Image (cartoon, rainbow, N blue to C red):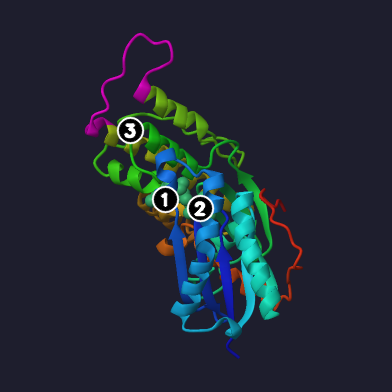
Amino acid sequence: MSQLLLAIESTCDETAAAVIRNDGEVLSSVVASQIEIHERFGGVVPELAARAHLDRILPVIDEAVREAGISLQDLSAVAVATSPGLVGSLLVGLTAAKTLALTLDIPLIAIDHVAAHIYACQMIASSDVFPAVGLVVSGGHTNLYDCRTALDLSLLGATIDDAAGEAFDKVAQILGLSYPGGPSIQKAAEQGDPKAFSFPRTFLNDDRLAFSFSGLKTAVRYEVEGQPGARRQPPPLTPERTADIAASFQAAVVDVLVAKCIQACKQTGYDRLCIGGGVAANRPFREALQQKCDQQKIQLVIAPMEYCTDNAAMGAIAWEKFQAGDFAALDIDATPGLVRR
Ligand code: KG4
Ligand code: ZN
């Protein structure tokens, strides 16, 4: 029998809702971005994000339901990302979901946002993608997982400082490029030489499955602003120089991400790799990873473009929980930190 659920996403700066059928078909996926609110700060301001979610959550849910051509009474469950994320942002989505579950008398399902990012890969696959290595690479995370099933994940390694997407955003700010930094750096890099600057590739030749991007960001800053205390002024930031720095920075991030994914596959023995999160939208990363996976005979599944950055459609993972009867109590809390398994 066909059943429908409403998934809600408000972990960071996107207010999103989707209606998803139990066969995985996405009937609607609405995303209200807050880029215009945060761009002048070069990053997400948590308090502003929470307030914007509050303004948008009900219109976004209404639109998702309307676009799907259903009414709220047709829903069999409501799902919401409860972790990880910004606490004020999470609470807005969670409160909306609890209210719907209570008033419609339907089960509430708690979604782990990082597991959902990886699950976006399952949504385009014709067969089971798990077990696999999973990489969530976004503005908040650079995490490698051993994904035994969609819901049974354990962390293999993560960044010790900035997330890769955060590095893209900060470097874009240093270069005077627009926010979010990922797309603007990718665009600027198209005109640049990725070998023009030799930026650090931290942990590249290290056995640990760990990432660090803060040294890379600092190296870019010194290249643009000059070394602290140095007498020599750096050359002016012309469009050519900006493009070269963007391309060289992007190449350093891509090299490390690709190498660690392959290393994680070797370490776990898995020959399947699932990639999700905003940075997975990066074209040079997708291409370099595909090439390396072909060489290593690893099956690569990357989340579809529209489901890389934050969205509620990847809340399709909630059907896995529905089938397992894994429902949340109505007094469940938001958990801002990563739930480590
Ligand atoms: O998954 P997401 O929407 O939000 C988080 O959960 O963090 O990811 C947003 C991040 C931002 O840092 C943005 O700069 C980055 O993903 N991003 C990209 C690209 N598109 C978005 N990074 C590199 N290349 C892209 N094309
Ligand atoms: Zn995300």
Residue 207 higher or lower than 68, as above or below: above
What residue did someone put label 2 on?
13
Q: Residue at x 60, y 38 (%)?
A: 207
> Circle 1 — which element?
helix
Q: Provide the major secondary structure of the magenta segment.
A: loop
What range is drawn magenta here?
224-241
Residue 197 higher or lower than 117, as above or below: above
Residue 232 higher or lower than 81, as above or below: above
Q: Nearer the viewer, mark 3 or mark 1?
A: 1
Q: Residue at x 53, y 57 (%)?
A: 53
Q: Is residue 273 visible?
A: no
Q: Residue at x 68, y 77 (%)?
A: 103
Q: Position of residue 300 (x, y in %)?
A: 47, 60
Mark 2 and mark 1: Cα distance apart in space: 8 Å
Q: Position of residue 150 (x, y in %)?
A: 63, 66
Mark 3 and mark 1: Cα distance apart in space: 24 Å
Residue 18 higher or lower than 310, as above or below: below
Q: Are marks 2 and 1 in contact (CB under 8 Å)?
A: yes
> Circle 2 — which element?
loop
What residue did someone put label 1 on?
35
Say whether residue 341 is left or right of residue 206: right
What residue did someone put label 3 on?
245
Q: Is residue 8 visible?
A: yes
Q: Residue at x 46, y 70 (%)?
A: 29
